[in-house]
Each structure stands twice: as C-alpha cells, then as structure tokens.
Amino acid sequence: MTTKKQERRIKIKYRVRKNVNGTVERPRLSVFRSNKQIYAQIINDVNGTTLVAASSLGLEAMPKIEQAQKVGALLAEKAKAAGVEAVVFDRNGYLYHGRVKALADAAREGGLNF
C-alpha cells in the first residue's frame, strides 16, 4: 500500500525525468534514499548502463548525514577514476535538503561538476 508521500514523490520523479536525461558527455547522477540507507548511481541513459555506483551499506554506525557525505565523496572518487567529470543531478523526487543535499555537496567537493 502506497502512502500519499510516496505517490507525491513518484509524480515529481516522473515530471523531472521528462527533462533530465544522462548523455555520454554528461551522465545522470541518480539518488535513492531509503529510511536506513542512501544509494547513488551515475547512469548513461543512452546505453542504459550504470557507470559508477556507491551506497551507505556498511556505514550504519555513523549518523545518516555523515553516511551521505561519505557516499558522495566515494562516488566522486570512483567517477574520476572512470573518467566522468560532469553529471546531471537527478534528485529522484526527493527534496534537496538533508541527506540528498549532503551527498550532492560532497560529490561537488570531490570534483564532480553539476
């Protein structure tokens, strides 16, 4: 059973995805946030492949904001190794606040441009 909050997020997600697409030059950085974890992927939508992925699995001992910062830094490090410099940020319908903002800021500090 879905809640109104989840339905709202899904509507926003599809509305944003009409305009946000990842290309070869600028792949899409997609964020998924659950109650316990946060996941991030860099996706090439032209080929339908995931280039880089990072998650907070194994980081449960620290606060959630710090988990998101570590995931953002790790994602930026992996992206640099894969040769990705610039991305398009897809917040996936979540508000740009809290853990999503912490992940984005850490990825920017790590060297990703968006």
Image (cartoon, grey):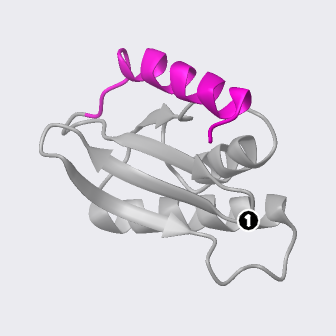
Give the position of the N terminus as an image quadrant: top right
Of 64 and 89, the residue lying toward us? 64
Which residue is rendered at x = 68% and y = 68% of the image?
70
Span highlighted in magenta in the image: 1-22
Residue 18 image offset from top left, x and y in percent:
35, 16
- Residue 114 to residue 50: above or below: above
Which residue is rendered at x = 53% and y = 35% of the image?
92
Q: Which residue is mark 1?
A: 36
**Residue 9 falls inside the magenta stretch:** yes
Does residue 81 show up? yes
Numbered-mark total = 1
Does residue 114 show up? no
Residue 109 image offset from top left, x and y in percent:
64, 51
Mark 1: which secondary structure? Answer: loop
Residue 12 image offset from top left, x and y in percent:
56, 20
Farthest-out residue, right: 63
Which residue is rendered at x = 56% and y = 35% of the image?
91
Residue 63 image offset from top left, x and y in percent:
87, 68
- Residue 46 to residue 14: above or below: below
Side of 58 relative to 23 (left or right):
right
**Residue 18 falls inside the magenta stretch:** yes
- Residue 12 to residue 81: above or below: above
Which residue is rendered at x = 50% and y = 62% of the image?
75
Kindly report the secondary structure that dominates the magenta region of the rendered protein.
Answer: helix
Packing grade of label 1 (10 A; few <14, some 14-19, many >=20) is few
The amino acid pointed to by label 1 is: Lys
Farthest-out residue, left: 47
